[in-house]
Amino acid sequence: RLTGQQQEINSLMQRKSAVDEENARLKNEFGNLNRKFKDKSQELKDTEECAQKKKEQNRLVIKNLEEENKGLNICCADLLSDLEKLRKQEAQWKKEKSGNDTRIK
C-alpha cells in the first residue's frame, strides 16, 4: 500500500512539475504578448499624433490658400476694373481721333 501511495505521490509531483513548466511557458508567452501589445499601442498612439499633426498642417495650408485666393480674386477684380477703364479710354481716344481725322480732311 505504501508503494502505491508513493507512486501516486511521484505521479502527482510529475504532473505538478509539468503544470509548473506549462505555467512558466504561458507566463513567458504572456509577457511577450504584453510587450508586443504595449509596442503596438505606442505605435498606434504615435501614428494618431502624426495624423493629427498632418491634419492641422493641411488645415493651415488650406486656410493660407483660401486667403491667397481671396487676395488674387481682389487683384483680378481690380485688373478687370482697370481693363474696363482702359477700354473706355481707348474708345474715347478713337472717337477723338476720328473727329480729328475728319477735321483734317
Image: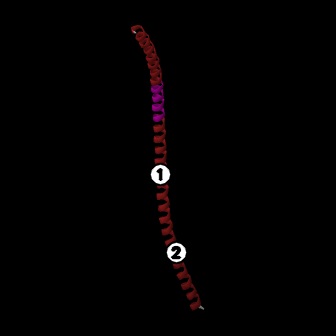
Q: Image quadrant of residue 9? A: bottom right
Q: Residues within 10 Å of mark 1 (few under 14, many from 20)?
A: few
- Which residue is rendered at x = 45% and y = 38% of the image? 61
Residue 67 falls inside the magenta stretch: yes
> Considering only vertical position in the picture, is 76 above or below 2?
above
Q: Which residues are magenta?
A: 64-77
Q: Which residue is mark 1?
A: 47
Q: Name the residue type under label 1.
A: Thr
Q: Which of these two is toward me, 102 or 41?
A: 102
List the residue tagged with mark 2: 22
Magenta segment: does it hold 93? no
Quadrant housing the C terminus: top left
Specify the farthest residue to the right.
1
Q: Dot 2, crowdedness within 10 Å: few (<14), some or many (≥20)?
A: few
Q: Is residue 71 above or below residue 93?
A: below
- For the residue labelled by badge 2, is the local secondary structure a helix, a strand or a loop? helix
Give the vertical position of 73 relative to 25 (above or below). above
Q: Main secondary structure of the magenta part?
A: helix
Question: Which mark lies nearer to you, 1 or 2?
Answer: 1
Chain-order first, disc 1 or disc 2: 2
State the colouring used for the structure image: secondary structure
x, y percent for residue 11: 55, 85
Q: CA distance from mark 1 to mark 2?
A: 37 Å
Extreme-left residue of the structure: 104
| Three-letter amino acid code of the residue under disc 2 | Glu
